[in-house]
Amino acid sequence: RIWNPVLDGPQLSLQPNDDDNPTTWAVADGNGAVYGFSQPGALAGSDLWVLTSIVDWAHQEFLHVDYEIATLAISGGTAITLDLKQVSYNASTKTGSCFKNAVTVGYNTAASAPLSLSMMGKVILARTRTAATIDVQSRAACASSLVVMKRYFLDTTSRTDPETGLPLLAQVTVSGRQDRSDAATQMLVGKYEYGTASSPCRTRTCPRASAW
């Protein structure tokens, strides 16, 4: 069974892998790219589907997305934590295996109470962690391990919003290849200052980035 939009995007088509109990959905954009959605981990059986792959058959390009998903007990029910873990791309074969490049996100220790709660359909999404590092990785060959070419450090622990108490991004630094002797050397990418304004942010905290 194939589904097509009634009003916008007539070139799009949605197709489940099973008409009665689908575990994946494929969305074709009419230009050769197919977007794959599934319900990994704790999302199984819910009404929330996440992007897990993009395949461009015309250019033989593949992308895969991994998440860290868990359940969290909250007052009155159960929430799900959904954090981006890794985006793999630049596959070396036509089957979409052996990705040569990846971007991996590392996180700080989870907060004792959710930083935020939101509803996605019938699913309660909880945020308990902030990003700590973003690794840009590469491998020379399929048999080789990924090597961190750049590592971005996100300081989200030294500053909090005075009104909400939520963490704020204070600064970003970057280091080079982690297999080199100077891997611990970091360079400043940017620092961020915050202030309260009546317009246009009114009582919300507005960021201002300082150049380096």
Image (spheres, rainbow, N blue to C red):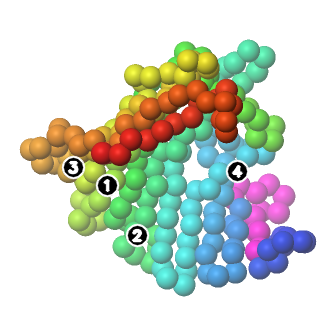
Marks 3 & 4, CB-CB < 8 Å contact:
no
Image location of residue 157, percent across then percent down: 42, 24
Of the numbered discs in the image, which one, if any, rests on residue 91? 2
Disc 3 or 1, which lies upstream in sequence?
1
**Which label lies toward us, 2 or 1?**
1
Residue position for label 3 = 176
Is 21 colored magenta in this rendering? yes
Q: Main secondary structure of the magenta part?
A: loop
Residue position for label 1 = 137
- Quadrant in which the C terminus is drawn: top left
Q: Which stretch appears magenta?
A: 12-24
Amino acid under label 3? Gly
Amino acid under label 2? Ala
Left or right position of 62 against 151: right
Marks 2 & 1, CB-CB < 8 Å contact:
no
Image location of residue 30, percent across then percent down: 70, 81
Asked which secondary structure carries label 2, the reply is: strand
**Which label lies toward us, 3 or 1?**
3
**Which picture quadrant has residue 18?**
bottom right
